[in-house]
Image (cartoon, helix red, strand yellow):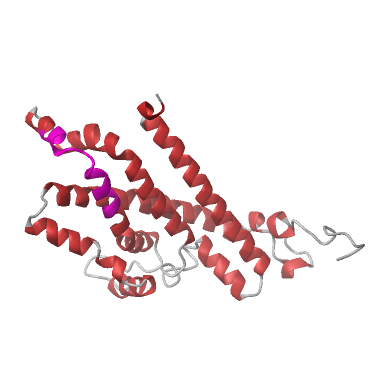
Amino acid sequence: MQNGSLFSNWTTHFWIGEGGTDMAQGQAGIFRNPVLIEALWMTLKLAVTVAITTMALGLALAHTIARNKGSVLATVLGQVSFTPILIPSIAFAAAYIALFGAPIGPLPSLYGTFLLLVLAASAHLLPYAVQSGRSVLGQISADIEESARLTGAGFFRRMGAIIMPLAIRGLLAGALLVFVKIVRDLSLVVLLFTSTSPVLSMLAYRYAAEGFMQFANAITMVILVLCVIATLLAHRLQNRVQKWKSA
């Protein structure tokens, strides 16, 4: 500390500083670092894609389980859909590398691709989406959907006009949970991470391992801000979709 001032050695270099200086071994601040900017967009794209994918699959599975309660199909789907939660994240990632790391027939190797990240993350977080879907569908009477079916409404018509509007709050809550888990997850992506698919959590881990705790802490703060913004956005979207809640 210089001149006895508390703020004398504070700096914004690790946020917006230019590269090539004497600080941080010449590395630029995180908002001037092209690798971090790419990681930010990759993380957002991955989180949104996985949230949408898992909630769509989760709602479909939950609908099948709820509307066929007591059947063998519902029992099997209920048990299988919760299997990924019993597998550690790093073991789950290793299994997907073993499965898709080499070409399968006409399908190319997916290792290092964005698609493999989506597949692994969606499968690993599917139990949360299924549980969210089962919770909201349990509050929607099957008689409403049956009445629509008798009037000639098809499956997609019923889902879009009846189920989705009534279940949107629960689905958004489940999607938000998936989004937050993907943004901050490290154990799942640590094996799937490559230079072509950087994510924020892996960059924070790499900076911390190299001793750049200022960069690691700054990225952690970015992750926190993303999670808070996602929560506020989901709350605002819920109020727009279900306007009767604020009436």
Q: In the rendered image, which quarter is residue 115 located in? A: bottom left
Residue for point 69% across, 65% down: 27
Rendered location of residue 159, percent (x, y)? 21, 38
- Foreground of the two, 9 or 68: 68
Figure label count: 0
Residue for point 16% across, 48% down: 66
Residue bounds of the magenta highlight: 130-146
Rendered location of residue 16, percent (x, y)? 70, 54
Q: Is residue 146 left or right of residue 183?
A: left
Residue for point 32% across, 45% down: 171
Q: Is residue 49 left or right of residue 106?
A: right
**Quarter of the figure with the C terminus:** top left
**In the image, is residue 107 above or below residue 38?**
below
Rendered location of residue 54, percent (x, y)? 31, 53
Specify the principal SS of the magenta part. helix
Rendered location of residue 134, percent (x, y)? 24, 49
**Quarter of the figure with the N terminus:** bottom right
- Foreground of the two, 177 or 157: 177
Q: Is residue 20 left or right of residue 107?
A: right
Visible residue check, residue 60: yes
Q: Is residue 181 left or right of residue 57?
A: right
Visible residue check, residue 108: no
| Residue furthest top as drawn | 247
Residue for point 59% across, 60% down: 219
| Residue furthest right as drawn | 3
Q: In the rendered image, which quarter is residue 123 located in? A: bottom left
Q: In the rendered image, which quarter is residue 182 located in? A: bottom left
Magenta span has 52?
no
